[in-house]
């Protein structure tokens, strides 16, 4: 949620629209809270049969819903992880140790993710908690420091070419990824999905973004916020100078670790379907760990292949975001169908309908923000084809084992 | 999987990543580098043109850009080569 990509996206939106960007944040929080409720609705309705996939299977069939899940999670795991690791490498090199190669640090961070995933679910959870604690602490320190800092004069509108009302549509892209917490391997009553905790985290995330908006608009000129690719660093530097850079650098590295760790762990679990009669505590866990390590290997290859220097990577990431939000749309649709069939669920159905409308606008917004829409269109065809092949292979392997 | 195999897999995974990193690092040391002091002295005399050929994340993620550098596409030399005369010193820098 507080990756450098998300923070910079928010900074660009604020620079472009000023306080007019806040409704987008509100729409995003509303949408994700409703979507979380939809996840809960269909998971509890189909708890014995794989919750999410079974629930959304009523829309277009179980294979289609499985395919959407792969399209939603796997491309972003590969593409965004590659990009974020490079960002973390640059941050470490330019903020902490100038002589340490940035790509070497990116590989070290990836190795840490691989190690945590190899050690299993508990190691992933503990490392996630540590990373999130660092992120939260760092952002709180920056927010508190803004009370005493020297602010810039009232933010004027940026130049015409940086005004972009499309940012109003893209609120859901900010807090995307909350559903990764749902794949944490919760099974026993003692480990039930912490629905309330995830909702609280979403609300807290929204509050922090709200504070960041106030800080950004009072400490950095809008023109700079709108056009830079590192708005979060500019804000931190304006707040506390070099100390601010160090704090933001720590936040960036921790958030990248947390994001990649969660993406790799979740994708590893999704790639390994449950088998009836499987010993869940050993069989699936072992295969998931190996799948996660395989993914880190693919990410390492992407880094070595120089993906980070290709503009196509950004298009790939944005296309993957579209699929992720489309998965949210599907989940809300599935829950809407359940509510629609039951008397007394009118308000819930209305809220889900509103969330679906916002998500649809967000999909449109992401497409309109894309600088290479033709490549995006091509990827939107290629990714499902590759995902379908992967789905067929894993399904066939599951049948062979039986 | 019993507990004793986990550390082994961690070590194997770390070694695999190191094996991937080492060739990349080694190849980087084969390229001749200009020190920042030498570049600084050339910039002061105005005897060099700095071209920033970083693309994608290599550009977006970096906080530092060399003052006076022109950003160009390193893969499309024809687009900017005519802007410079034969004999002019051009320094291209990347990630």
Image (cartoon, rainbow, N blue to C red):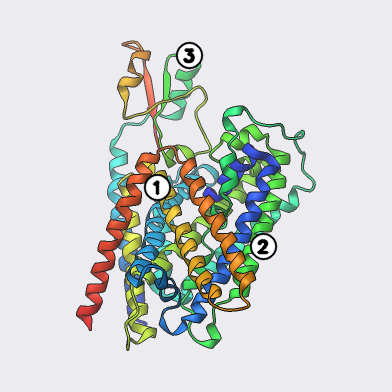
**Label 2 element class:** helix
Depicted A184 relative to depicted A17: above or below = below
Residue beneath the point at 49% across and 59% down: A259
Quadrant of residue A35 within the rendered picture: bottom right
Instruction: Please rate how many residues cluster around mark 2, counting C-alpha atoms within 10 Å: few if below 14, some from 14 to 19, many from 20.
Output: some
Horizontal and vertical percent for residue A287?
Answer: 32, 75
Q: Are marks 2 and 1 on the same chain?
A: yes
**Label 3 element class:** helix
Q: CA distance from mark 2 to mark 3?
A: 54 Å
Depicted B89 relative to depicted A81: above or below = above
Which residue is under mark 3? Answer: B45
Please tell me whether mark 1 or mark 3 is closer to you in this view.
1
Q: Are marks 1 and 3 on the same chain?
A: no
Specify the subunit that label 1 lies on. A
A159 on left or right of A376: right
Q: Sequence order check: which comes first, mark 2 or mark 1?
A: 1
Which residue is under mark 2? Answer: A204
A274 on left or right of A48: left
- Residue A101, visible in the rendered structure: no
Please tell me whether mark 2 or mark 1 is closer to you in this view.
2
The disc label shown at residue A103, or none: 1
Q: CA distance from mark 2 to mark 1?
A: 33 Å
Q: On the rendered image, what quadrant is the C terminus of chain A found in?
A: bottom left
Residue beneath the point at 31% across and 11% down: B86
Q: On the rendered image, what quadrant is the N terminus of chain A found in?
A: bottom right
Quadrant of residue B50 within the rendered picture: top left
Horizontal and vertical percent for residue A47?
Answer: 47, 82
Q: CA distance from mark 1 to mark 3?
A: 33 Å
- Residue A357, visible in the rendered structure: yes
Q: Nearer the viewer, residue A75 or A59?
A: A59
């Amino acid at each position: 949620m507080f990756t450098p990509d998300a923070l910079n996206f928010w900074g660009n939106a604020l620079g472009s629209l000023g306080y007019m960007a806040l409704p987008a944040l509100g729409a995003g929080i509303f949408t994700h809270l409703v979507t979380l409720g939809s996840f809960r609705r269909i998971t509890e309705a189909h708890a014995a049969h794989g919750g999410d996939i079974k629930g959304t299977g009523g829309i277009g069939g179980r294979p289609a819903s499985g395919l959407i899940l792969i399209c939603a999670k796997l491309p972003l795991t590969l593409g965004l992880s590659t990009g974020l690791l490079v960002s973390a490498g640059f941050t470490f090199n330019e903020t902490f140790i100038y002589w340490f190669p940035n790509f070497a640090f990116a590989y070290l961070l990836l190795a840490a993710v691989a190690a945590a995933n190899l050690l299993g679910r508990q190691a992933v959870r503990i490392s996630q908690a540590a990373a999130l604690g660092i992120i939260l602490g760092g952002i709180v320190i920056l927010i508190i420091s803004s009370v005493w800092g020297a602010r810039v004069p009232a933010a004027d509108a940026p130049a015409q070419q940086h005004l972009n009302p499309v940012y109003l549509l893209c609120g859901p892209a900010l807090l995307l990824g909350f559903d990764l917490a749902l794949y944490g391997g919760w099974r026993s009553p003692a480990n039930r999905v912490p629905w309330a905790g995830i909702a609280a985290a979403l609300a807290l995330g929204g509050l922090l973004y709200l504070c960041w908006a106030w800080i950004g608009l009072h400490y950095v000129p809008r023109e700079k916020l709108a056009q830079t690719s590192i708005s979060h660093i500019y804000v931190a530097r304006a707040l506390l100078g070099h100390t601010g850079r160090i704090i933001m650098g720590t936040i960036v590295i921790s958030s990248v670790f947390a994001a990649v760790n969660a993406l790799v762990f979740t994708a590893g679990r999704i790639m390994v379907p449950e088998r009836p009669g499987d010993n869940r505590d050993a069989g699936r866990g072992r295969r998931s760990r190996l799948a996660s390590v395989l993914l880190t290997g693919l990410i390492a290859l992407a880094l070595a292949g120089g993906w980070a220097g290709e503009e196509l990577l950004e298009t790939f990431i944005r296309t993957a975001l579209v699929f992720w939000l489309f998965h949210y749309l599907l989940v809300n649709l599935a829950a809407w169908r359940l509510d629609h069939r039951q008397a007394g669920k009118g308000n819930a159905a209305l809220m889900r309908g509103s969330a679906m409308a916002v998500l649809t606008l967000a999909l449109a917004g992401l497409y309109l923000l894309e600088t290479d829409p033709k490549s995006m269109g091509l990827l939107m065809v290629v990714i499902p084809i590759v995902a379908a092949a992967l789905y067929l292979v894993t399904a066939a392997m599951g049948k062979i084992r039986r | 999987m019993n507990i004793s195999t986990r550390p082994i897999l961690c070590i194997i995974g770390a070694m695999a990543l190191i094996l991937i990193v080492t060739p990349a690092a080694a190849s980087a040391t084969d390229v001749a580098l200009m020190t920042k002091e030498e570049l600084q002295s050339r910039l002061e005399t105005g005897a060099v043109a700095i071209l920033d050929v970083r693309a994608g994340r290599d550009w977006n993620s970096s906080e530092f850009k060399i003052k006076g550098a022109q950003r160009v596409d390193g893969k499309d030399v024809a687009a900017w080569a005519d802007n410079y005369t034969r004999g002019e010193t051009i320094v291209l820098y990347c990630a």
